[in-house]
Amino acid sequence: MRSADEFHAFCAALPATSHVVQWGGHDVWKVGGKVFVIAGFSEQEGPRFSFKVSDISFEILQDQPGLRPAPYLASRGMSWIQHYEEPGLDDAALRDYVRESHRLVAAGLTKKKQRELGLLSD
């Protein structure tokens, strides 16, 4: 998932997502209006991905090579990790964490909003 096209296709396939470009040209994917992943694609630095994680995952991932607490978000007490360089996460793990970020953010929406988006089965 290192190319922008591959990343966008993956995120677009998740339920009830939307995409905007903001914060200095970053690709921001949302569910129910709430951010679940932020990506930047730079030829100089390579791709960077920031995503929400559980508290336990945050503790495990924050000191792994190529990963760090996401700038700005983690400094405000949020459990967000940034994959910023190799080795970081392999593609399968990155997909799993982005999928889990989507789930965590969607679970934080109101039940009404989850129903409106088709994220809850009645």
Image: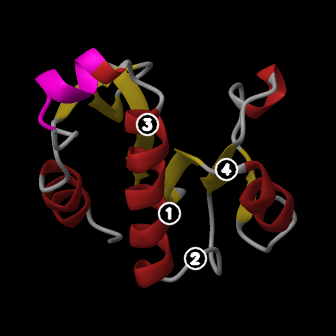
User: In what element is the residue under mark 3?
Assistant: helix
Q: Which quarter of the rendered picture does the C terminus lie within?
A: top left
List x then y, in percent, for residue 66. Answer: 71, 68
Could you tell me if the residues under marks 4 and 2 are in contact, i.e. CB atoms within 8 Å? no
* CA distance separating discs 1 and 2: 9 Å
Of labels 1 and 4, the one closer to you: 1
Q: CA distance from mark 4 to mark 2?
A: 11 Å
1 and 4 marks in contact (CB < 8 Å): yes
Which mark is in front, 3 or 1? 3
Q: Real-space Cα distance between discs 3 and 4?
A: 19 Å
Which residue is label 3 attached to?
107
Q: Nearer the viewer, residue 42 or 35?
A: 35
- Distance from the alpha carbon under mark 3 to that under mark 1: 15 Å
In the figure, is residue 4 to the left or right of 36? left
Q: Position of residue 15 (x, y in %)?
A: 17, 46
Dot 3 amino acid type:
Ala
Between marks 3 and 2, how big is the CA–CA gap?
24 Å
Residue named by callout 2: 89
Question: Which numbered disc, 3 or 2, marks the residue that appears first in the sequence?
Answer: 2
Q: CA distance from mark 1 to mark 4?
A: 10 Å
Q: Quadrant of residue 38?
A: top left
* Res 97 label: 1
Q: Which residues are magenta?
A: 112-118
Q: Which residue is mark 4?
A: 81
Is 64 contained in the magenta span?
Answer: no
Q: Position of residue 35 (x, y in %)?
A: 41, 29
Quadrant containing the N terminus is bottom left
- Res 122 visible: yes
- Counting residues from the start of the chain, the first of labels 3 and 1 encountered is 1
What residue appears at the point 17 percent right and 44 percent down from the top-left corner? Answer: 121
Q: Is residue 62 left or right of residue 81?
A: right
Question: N-terminal of the two: label 1 or label 2?
Answer: 2
